[in-house]
Amino acid sequence: MLEMAMTADQLAEHYSEVARKLVKAHLEVKEEPLLLAVQLRAKNAKDLVLLEVIENFPGSPDEALFETEMPPSRDVPILGSLRLILCNLSQLEAALKRHDRMLSPGQVLFPPKNRRSATLKKLIGLLELRK
C-alpha cells in the first residue's frame, strides 16, 4: 500500500513500478498494439504521466494529442492523478516538432532498446533532448 511517509526516491520508484504494470497490461491489448510507452516527468510530483504511442490510434498529425486524467484507484495506487496521453506515431512526430507543452522528458518503458525501430529511436532522441 502507498504510504504517506515515503521518501521522494521511494515514491519515484513506486510510481515507476505502477507505470510498468500499466504498460504491461496495455501490451496485452492485441487490438491496439503499443509502439512506445514513456513515463513523462510530471509537474506535480503526486501525479503519474504516461505517454503511449499506439499503432492505428485515430487522429491526424495536426490534431492535439489525446489526454485523459483519472483519480487514484486500487489498480493505480498513487497520491495524485494518472494522466494518460495517447497518440499515433505521426501525431507524436508532429507534437515534437511543434514543441507541444504536454511532452516532457521521461523514461522509456517500452520497447526495450533491442526492439526499437529507427523511427522510434529518432522520436525517443527528440524526447530526451527536451530534458
Image: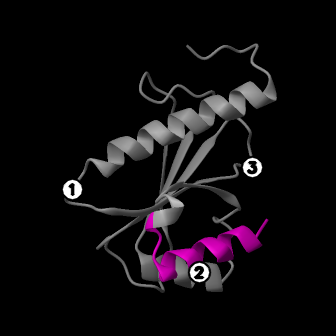
Q: Quadrant of the C terminus?
A: bottom right
In the displayed structure, 124 sits above or below 76; it is: below
Instruction: Locate residue 75, reporting x and y percent.
Output: 41, 27
Q: Is residue 22 above or below residue 103?
A: above
Callout in the foreground (1, 3): 1
Label 2's element?
A: helix
In the picture shown, does residue 55 fall above or below 98? above
Q: Earlier in the sequence, mark 1 or mark 3?
A: 1
Residue labelled with disc 3 = 43
Please name which of the two marks, 3 or 2, marks the residue nearer to the observer: 2
Residue 27 visible in the displayed image: yes
Q: Which mark is residue 122?
A: 2
Q: Give whichever of 120, 87 is nearer the camera.
A: 120
Residue 48, position as x, y percentages in the image: 60, 42
Which range is magenta? 115-131
- Say which amino acid is labelled 2: Lys
Q: Residues within 10 Å of mark 1 (few under 14, many from 20)?
A: few
What is the CA distance from the residue labelled 3 to the residue labelled 2? 25 Å
> Label 1, label 3: how many angstroms apart (C-alpha)?
32 Å
Check if residue 124 falls in the magenta segment.
yes
Say which quarter of the image contains residue 126: bottom right
Marks 1 & 2, CB-CB < 8 Å contact: no
Q: Dot 2 surroundings within 10 Å: few (below 14), some, or many (20 or more)?
A: few
Which structural element holds mark 3? loop
Please tell me how crowded label 3 is: few (under 14), some (14-19), or many (20+) other residues with Cα within 10 Å.
few
The residue wearing badge 1 is: 30
First in sequence: mark 1 or mark 2?
1
Question: Mark 3 vs mark 2: which is more N-terminal?
Answer: 3
